[in-house]
Image (spheres, rainbow, N blue to C red):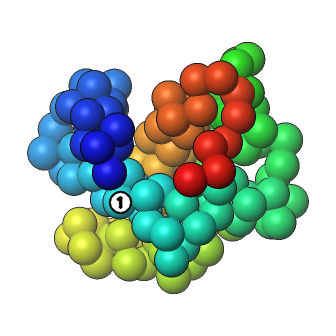
Amino acid sequence: MGLLDGMLGQLGGLFGGGARDKNLVNSVLQMVSAPEAGGLAGIVKGFESSGLSQLVQSWVSTGKNLPATAQQIEQGLGVEKIKGLAQNLGLSPDVVKAKLADVLPKLIDKLTPDGVVPKT
């Protein structure tokens, strides 16, 4: 997870820099790098299979990111992932969804600078 570890510091500043925001970014980076969940490609696929292809592809592409709503985040990631993140962070699922609506588009954008989801 070397690349992702290095990005944590850079990305933390993008999202407010508070301890909970950094913990959220760290949790999402762990999710993105988890092979059992399919990594970043698995997250992108989850959004695509939920009917949110245009949204997630805007984050992957080199163009402008479309904004996400809390409902779209839940739809793309699934209720169980949201609940798990919320429990790990000591936040309500609604707060996690709202924060992810801000964080996830930026994070995926930064992880796909060439507009391509890495295979590994």
Asked whether residue 60 is in view, the answer is yes
Q: Residue at x 25, y 73 (%)?
A: 88
Give residue 26's position: percent from left, percent from top. Answer: 28, 51
Q: Nearer the viewer, residue 50 or 93?
A: 50
Give residue 83's position: percent from left, percent from top. Answer: 42, 78
Q: What kind of element bears circle 1? A: helix
**Picture quarter containing residue 21?**
top left
Query: Is 65 rendered above or below residue 76?
Result: above
Q: Residue at x 31, y 33 (%)?
A: 7
Work out which residue is located at the far left of the displayed protein and give it. 19
Q: Residue at x 51, y 77 (%)?
A: 36
Residue type (three-letter) at the residue carrying disc 1: Gln
Query: Is 17 rendered above or below residue 42?
Result: above
Work out which residue is located at the far bottom of the displayed protein and give it. 80
Q: Nearer the viewer, residue 116 or 90?
A: 116
Q: Residue at x 81, y 57 (%)?
A: 48
Numbered label tally: 1
Query: What residue did someone put label 1 on?
Result: 30
Query: Is 64 rendered above or below residue 108?
Result: above
- Left or right: 42 with respect to 88? right
Give residue 53's position: percent from left, percent from top. Answer: 83, 49
**Picture quarter containing residue 44?**
bottom right
